[in-house]
Amino acid sequence: MNWLSAIQHLHETSTPGVLITVAAVRGHAPREAGAKMVVSADVSWDSVGGGNLEATAAERARAMLKVSATAPELFTLRLTDKASNEYGRQCCGGEVTLLLEPLQTVRPHIAIFGVGHVGLELGRILSRLPLNLHLVDSRAAQLTPERLAPLMDGAARVEVHHSPIPEMTLHDLPPGAHILILTHDHAEDAALCDAALRRPDLGFTGLIGSSVKWIRFQEQLRREGHSDAALARITTPIGLPGIFGKTPAVIAVSVAAQLVQRLEAEQAAAIPSSLLQRHP
């Protein structure tokens, strides 16, 4: 598998990785500028020159993966017998500068259940972000290519699910997926809440609606066997506090901002505290 196929593989499997590129060469070196390889936590693909050069680059890349680094970095290695060669000697006589770029191959999954007025506006915003966006509706008319066209040219990978029983699609979402429940039918909303509470591996679960709606849902969900602690996993109403507008666009902006806060908090939590404390 070459480096390009490797990147596609990492995207398909949501596996973290680093792209390593020979950025510059002075003198003699095993590979020319532009040569690339890809490194994951336990596998590498393609080559930037083998030997100490490649082993050192892979070690640096895996150190970046361990701290969930997002910024690229450059480093230079001299290929002489006087240079440090932890993984064997390379005496080509040149100097190689490598660019290490963390890949955005691990994307959060966000599922919008109900692609009505609010769901469509929310999908427009989220489709601009690098994530996996699932659009789920029991009504085929809400999911036509013409209606969803504005969501298809952004950074998100959009998956459309026409699901007469939407909770069946919820069962197929990967662990950690964030879900937003805003269908046209309170019965569907209630069924989705029940299904979501039966999956403790999900991420944020948001429900649109009023406090009266939630009181009724809690009574129903308790009859289904859910505890108060489980019910606390559902956030309702959704959206940032302090935003009171009820138009679809305003609700969508508020909910999207709330989700971005959650995603950024998760990303920060993945970075060791020792690194966060380096800067006052």
Image (tube, helix red, strand yellow):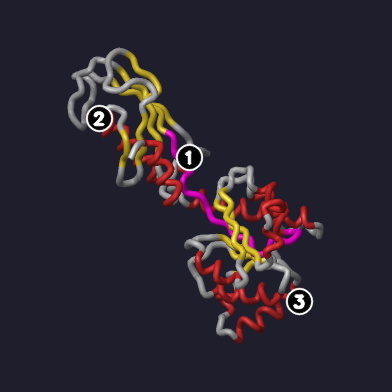
Q: Which residue is mark 2?
A: 50
Give the Cα separation between the discs numbered 2 and 1. Answer: 25 Å
Q: Quadrant of the N terminus?
A: top left
Q: Are marks 2 and 1 in contact (CB under 8 Å)?
A: no
What is the secondary structure assignment of the residue under circle 3?
Answer: helix
Image spot of residue 67 (x, y percent): 41, 44
**Residue 99 covered by magenta stretch:** no
First of labels 2, 1 by sequence position:
2
First of labels 1, 3 by sequence position:
1
Residue 238, quarter of picture: bottom right
Pointer 2: residues within 10 angstroms few (<14), some, or many (20+)? some
Q: Residue at x 19, y 19 (%)?
A: 81
The image shows a total of numbered marks equal to: 3
What is the secondary structure assignment of the residue under circle 2?
Answer: loop
> Which of the two residues, 200 or 115, is positioned nearer the viewer here?
115
What's the amino acid at mark 1?
Answer: Thr
* Visible residue check, residue 42: yes
Region in magenta: 101-118
Task: Please name which of the two marks, 2 or 1, marks the residue nearer to the observer.
Answer: 2
Q: Residue at x 63, y 43 (%)?
A: 153
Q: Are marks 3 and 2 in contact (CB under 8 Å)?
A: no
Q: Are marks 1 and 3 in contact (CB under 8 Å)?
A: no
Q: Residue at x 61, y 86 (%)?
A: 223
* Visible residue check, residue 274: no
Task: Please name which of the two marks, 3 or 2, marks the residue nearer to the observer.
Answer: 2
What's the amino acid at mark 2?
Answer: Gly
Residue 200 vertical placement versus 143 (above, below): below
Q: Which residue is mark 1?
A: 70
Q: Which residue is mark 3?
A: 212
Q: Is residue 17 left or right of residue 165?
A: left
Residue 85, quarter of picture: top left
**Residue 112 covered by magenta stretch:** yes
